[in-house]
Image (spheres, helix red, strand yellow):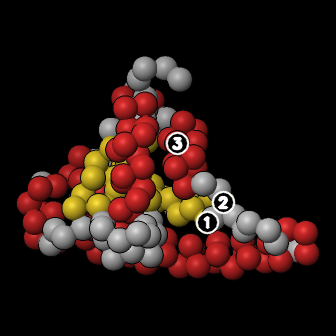
Amino acid sequence: MSGQRRSYESGHRPKFMVVVDKTPECARAVHFASRRAARTGASMLMLAVVDPPDNFEWIGVGEAMIEEASAEAAKLLDAASREARNAAGVEPEQVIRVGNRSEEIIKLIREDEDVSFLVLAAGSSKEGPGPLVSTLAGKSASTFPVPIVIVPGSLTDEEIDALAG
C-alpha cells in the first residue's frame, strides 16, 4: 500500500468508517463520525462484522446462522444510518462482512483507499467496542493505515457536537 490514501487525490472524498455493533456506545461513534463527515464534506462508511459459526458447517447449520446474523447486522446498520441522517444529514455506505472483526476492519480499510479515519466508541463491557479498542490500541494501532478516533461512550450528543464542530 502506498503511503498516501486516495482520499487525498482530486475527485475523492475522505471517508469516516464506523464499526457498528449492538452496544449503546456505538451510537456515540456514529454521532461523532456523521457530524464530522458533514462538517468536513467527507462521506461515511459503516461496517458490521458477523462472527462465523465455529463447528456447525458439517450439518449445513452454519450457513443459516450466518444468514440470520447478517440479517440482524443489516438491521443494526439501518438503525445506525437513521442516526447519521438525523444527526447530520449524512447517508452512510453500509458493509457487512463475515469473519474476525479486527481482520475484517483492516481488510476493508485496505480495499477502500478513500477510508481516512476509523471511528470507534470506547465502552467498558466485555462485549463490543471496549475489547476491540483495547485490542487495536494494544496490538496493532501503530500499524494501521489510517488514524483511529476513539469516542468515549459516556459523551452526550451536545458534547460530541461541540467536539466535532
Q: Earlier in the sequence, mark 3 or mark 2?
A: 2
Say which residue label 2 marks.
98
Q: Give amino acid for label 1.
A: Val
Q: Residue at x 29, y 75 (%)?
A: 86
User: Which quadrant of the view contains residue 62?
Assistant: bottom right
Q: Position of residue 8 (x, y in %)?
A: 36, 29
Say which residue label 1 marks.
50
Tag shown at residue 120: none
Residue 76 visible at all: yes
Nearest to the observer: residue 69 or residue 91: 69
Residue at the far right: name it: 59
User: Which quadrant of the view contains residue 120?
Assistant: bottom left
Q: Earlier in the sequence, mark 1 or mark 3?
A: 1
SS for callout 1: strand
Residue 7 visible at all: no
Q: Earlier in the sequence, mark 2 or mark 1?
A: 1
Q: Give amino acid for label 3.
A: Ile
Say which residue label 3 marks.
106
SS for callout 2: strand
Q: Residue at x 16, y 68 (%)?
A: 155
Nearest to the observer: residue 16 or residue 70: 70
Q: Give amino acid for label 2.
A: Val
